[in-house]
Image (tube, rainbow, N blue to C red):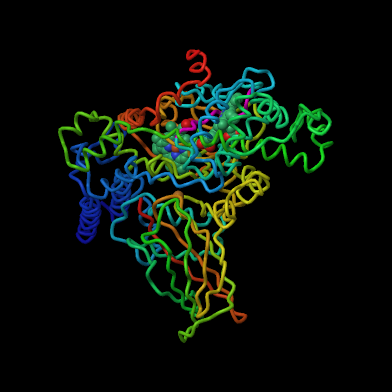
Amino acid sequence: MTKKTVKQLTLSIIFLLLSACSGDQGDQGQATQASNQMPATANSMDEMNMETSMNAMPGMTGMPHTMTMPETDELGQSRSTDNGLFQVSIEPAIDPLPLSRMHGWVLSLADAAGAPVDGAVILVEGGMPAHNHGMPTSPQVTGNLGEGRYQIEGVQFQMPGHWVMTFKISADGQLDSVTYNLMLQP
Amino acid sequence: MNRTIIYLLIVIAAVLGFVFTANDTQENAEILVENQSDVVMQVKLDPHEWSSKELGILQSLSLESLPALPPDASNFVADNSIASNFGHQLFFDARLSSNGEVSCASCHKPELKFTDGLPRSLGVGVTPRKSMTIIGTAYSPWLFWDGRKDSQWSQALGPLENPEEHGANRNFYVHIIANDASYRGQYESLFGEIPDLSDAIRFPPSAGPVSDPEANAAWDSMAPEDKEVINKIFVNLGKSIAAYERLLMPGNSRFDDYVESALSNNRQQQEELFTESEARGLDVFIGKAQCINCHNGPLLTNNAFHNTGIPPALDLPPDFGRIEGVYMVKEDPFNCLGEYSDEDQEQCEDLIYTRTEGQEIIAAFKTPTLRNVAETSPYMHSGQIPNLTEVIRHYNAAPLAVRGHSELATIDLTTEEMRALEDFLHTLSSPVDVSAEYLESPWQQLLSEE
Ligand SMILES: [Cu+2]
C-alpha cells in the first residue's frame, strides 16, 4: 500500500462515517465555523440550519455572520454595541418572554462611559434565522422615558425557538448596533 | 506507514466518539434503529413517557391553558344574551341573501364543525377560498385566511356584501330588519330606535359599496348622513352575529384528557385514552416534525401568517394572501381604529403594529386551528389538499412555494411516523362547548314550538 492510497482510504472512511451519522449532523462543520460559542452538541434542527439561512433572511441584511448560538438567551445582559459606542440593556414587560402575545420592552441606552443617552433614534428588527422570517409585527420606539430609557411597543414572537433582535442606534451623529440572541420557550 | 494507520484509527475513534456522545444527551431512553433507508434515527422506547420539558409543552397545548375569553372592547354587546340570540337567528336566516337561499350556516354548518366540507364554498356564487371553522375564533386577532378583518363583528359584514356569498348589500339587509316586527323589536331593545327608513329615495331598497353597479350607484347617490344611519345599523347586525359566534368554543378532546392523565402520571388512563400510535404521533407533532412552531397554544394556532408552499389552485387568479389582506384591514372603515368600533384606540395594537411588508408575508396564510381537524376536510386556503394523509406528505416533502418563499424544511418522517401523526390529529376532535340549541337553526325550533 502506498501512502497515497492510505490517505484516500482514510478520507473515504471519514466521509462515509460522517454521512452515516444523519443529515443534520452533516452541517455541524459549517455551523461551528460560523459561531464562537457553539454548544458541544446541537440538539435541534433550528440551531443547525442557522448559518446557511442567515443571508436570505428578510430585513436582516447587515447581520453579522459570526453570531453566537446560546443555550440560554442573552436577554438579561447589558451589552456593548458592535463598535463599542453604546451600552444597551433590555427589559421586556412580560417575563418569561411570551409566545404570540404583544407586549412592550424598555431599552436602556448609555454611552461607553456609562452616561445615559437621551434623544437617540432606535430601529428594532427581529427574526428567526433558522426559518427565514422576521417578526409578525414592526415594533416601534414610542417614547423616550428619560435617563436613557426608551419605550418600545409592538414586540411579538409567533414561534418558539432561537430569535435574534437587532437594535440600530443613532445618537449624537454616531451609528452603532447590537444584536441579542433570545430563546423563546414553547 | 505506521503513522498513517495510527492517524486513521484516531480519526475513526474520534468520529465514533462524536456519534455516541451526540446521542447521550437525549433526555429519554432511546435506541438507535436503522430503517430501510439506513438513516440512523431515534425511537422512544415508551411512547407514554414524557420528559418534564415535554410535559410542559403538552400542558401549553391543552384546553386547560386557554385563558378566560377576554372582553371584546370593540363590541359593547359582545356578551349580551339578547344580542347572541338575535345573532343566532341572523346566522341561520337565508332571507339575508340576494337569492333567499344563503345564510352564514350554508357554509358554516354546525354538524361539520362550522365548515362545509367543500374545497371552495357555494353561496350565490363560488368562493375562491375554503370555508373556515368559527369555533374559537373569538380568540383570533385576525379573521379570514389573509387576516383582512380584525374583529368578529367586522368579519361578519364581509360575506353579507360579497357577491359570491350572500350577494346583497347593506341597505337590503337593513330594510329586512326594519320591516320584520320581531327583528325590529330585538334590534331596538339592544341599540335603540331605528329611524324611519320608508323614503325610498333617501334609503334605496338596494344600495351599498358593492360590485353590483346598480346598488353601487344607489349608494353613491345617498347623503352622507343617511349612509351613516345605514352603516350604524349594518354594523350592529355584525356585532349581534359576533355575540352569537363568541359562544362557540371547543370542548375537551381526547387529547386534552390524555394531557391531564400524563400530567398526573396516571399511566393506566394514558393507555386507555391513547393508542401507542397516537402517543407516538403526538411525540412527532411536538418533536421531530416541529408542527408546534406554528400550531401552538391551546387552539393549536399562533394566529400568525406563514407561507407553507401550498400549491395554488390552478383555475384561480393569483392569491397573495397576507400581503394583500394587511392592506385591506388597514384601510377598512370597520377596523379597530375606525369610528364604528367601540374600542379605545389605544387597544388596537394588533392593527397598529402588524407587519405590512417583507417577503415572508407574500402568499402567507393564517395558521388554522387544528382542533376538530379530522372532521373538516378538505384542507388549506383553497381546499387544495383532500385529506390528512396528503397534508402530512406535503409537510414531509416541503415543496418550494410557487409564490413567495415557503418556510418549511423537509422532515424525513418514516411511514410509521406519518401514520402516527395522522392518528394523533384524530384525537383533537370534540363537541362544541355550548348548549345544544345554539347548534341548530333557531328557525326550526321556532317552527316546532308553534
Ligand atoms: Cu420560525
Along the viewing direction, whichever of B119 and B406 lies nearer the viewer: B119
Along the viewing direction, whichever of B272 and B313 lies nearer the viewer: B272
Q: Quadrant of residue A92?
A: bottom left
Task: Estimate the x, y position of residue A4 in percent, counting from the top left.
Answer: 32, 54
Q: From the viewer's perspective, is A80 left or right of B44? A: right
Which residue appears at 34% of the width and 32% of the height?
Answer: B421
Task: Estimate the x, y position of residue B49 in percent, counting from the top left.
Answer: 19, 41
Which residue appears at 65% of the width and 25% of the height?
Answer: B166
Q: Main secondary structure of the magenta part?
A: loop
Up the image or down, A59 lies above or below B149; here it is below
- Give the number of callouts: 0
Task: Estimate the x, y position of residue B444 in percent, counting from the top left.
Answer: 50, 16
Q: In this orientation, does residue B38 appear?
A: yes
Q: In this orientation, does residue B312 appear?
A: no
Q: From the viewer's perspective, is B276 left or right of A85? A: left
* Quarter of the figure with the N terminus of chain B: bottom left
Q: From the viewer's perspective, is B323 left or right of B201? A: left
Up the image or down, B137 lies above or below A11; here it is above
Along the viewing direction, whichever of B161 and B76 lies nearer the viewer: B76
Provide the residue span drawn in magenta.
Answer: B126-135
Q: Is residue B263 within the magenta segment?
A: no
Task: Estimate the x, y position of residue A137 in percent, counting from the top left.
Answer: 54, 54
Q: From the viewer's perspective, is B124 left or right of B390? A: right
Q: Is residue B132 within the magenta segment?
A: yes
